[in-house]
């Protein structure tokens, strides 16, 4: 139950991601190189940056399961990337007005990586190194 308390912001954010995933999209013209820098890609990046950051905070704050604490980077990235793939596949198969886009998936992955950077920036080098080294308590 304690773990759920620390992960509740990440779970709420995930529900928001799932809600946004199912919303109808506008008709987008063909993909070009400049689409890598579109507002849509920025939104994907920010959404997954926040999601992975919230996961890391939840895993790092809980002290019941040492594995989740010491491997919070790996768990957070794994969960973030799983849901990035899952939501894009849902858009490509379930939602008629949405489609699977490789560039969205790439932006999601980039956001997952930035979530770790954000965690280190906010919580500092000490706790980040403690988690990375896994054997220091």
Image (cartoon, rainbow, N blue to C red):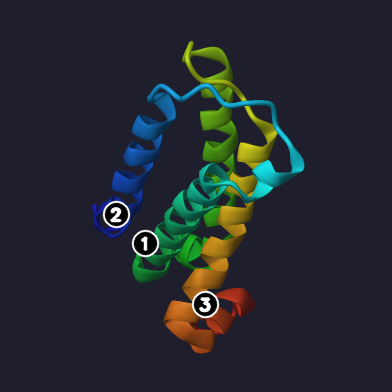
Q: Position of residue 1 (x, y in %)?
A: 24, 52
- Quarter of the view holding residue 122: bottom left
Secondary structure state at the residue bearing disc 1: helix
Query: Could you tell whether 33 is left or right of 83 in the image?
Result: right
Q: Nearer the viewer, residue 69 or 89?
A: 89
Residue tagged 3? 120
Q: Is residue 22 left or right of residue 96?
A: left
Please tell me whether mark 3 sits on a helix, a strand or a loop: helix
Q: Which residue is mark 2?
A: 9
- Vertical order, 80 against 30 (above or below): below
Taking the view exactly as shown, the residue that stands out farthest to the right is 33
Q: Earlier in the sequence, mark 2 or mark 1?
A: 2
Which residue is depicted at the point 49% across and 13% down? 94
Q: Residue at x 53, y 79 (%)?
A: 128
Distance between the Cα atoms at labels 3 and 1? 14 Å
At a point 40% along the width and 24% down the height, the residue shown is: 22
Q: Position of residue 135 (x, y in %)?
A: 59, 79
Distance from the alpha carbon under mark 2 to that under mark 3: 18 Å
Q: Quadrant of residue 133?
A: bottom right
> Residue at the bottom extreme?
126
Q: Residues within 10 Å of mark 2 (few under 14, many from 20)?
A: some
Mark 3 or mark 1, whichever is nearer to me? 3
Marks 2/1 in contact by CB < 8 Å: the verdict is: yes
Q: Is residue 125 above or below residue 101?
A: below
Q: Nearer the viewer, residue 38 or 95?
A: 38
Question: Quick check: can you spot residue 71?
Answer: no
Tell me where residue 87 appears, x and y as whole percent: 51, 30
Q: Position of residue 57 (x, y in %)?
A: 39, 66
Q: Which residue is mark 1?
A: 58
Q: Secondary structure at mark 2?
A: helix
Residue 35 in view of the camera: yes
């Amino acid at each position: 139950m304690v773990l759920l308390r620390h992960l509740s912001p990440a779970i709420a954010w995930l529900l928001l991601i799932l809600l946004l995933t199912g919303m109808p999209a506008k008709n987008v013209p063909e993909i070009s190189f400049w689409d890598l820098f579109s507002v849509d890609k920025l939104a994907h990046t920010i959404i997954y940056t926040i999601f992975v950051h919230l996961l890391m905070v939840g895993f790092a704050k809980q002290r019941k399961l040492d594995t989740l604490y010491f491997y919070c980077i790996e768990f957070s990235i794994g969960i973030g990337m799983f849901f990035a793939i899952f939501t894009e596949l849902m858009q490509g198969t379930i939602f008629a007005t949405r489609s699977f886009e490789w560039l969205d998936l790439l932006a999601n992955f980039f956001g997952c990586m930035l979530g770790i950077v954000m965690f280190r920036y906010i919580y500092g080098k000490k706790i980040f190194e403690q988690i990375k080294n896994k054997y220091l308590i």
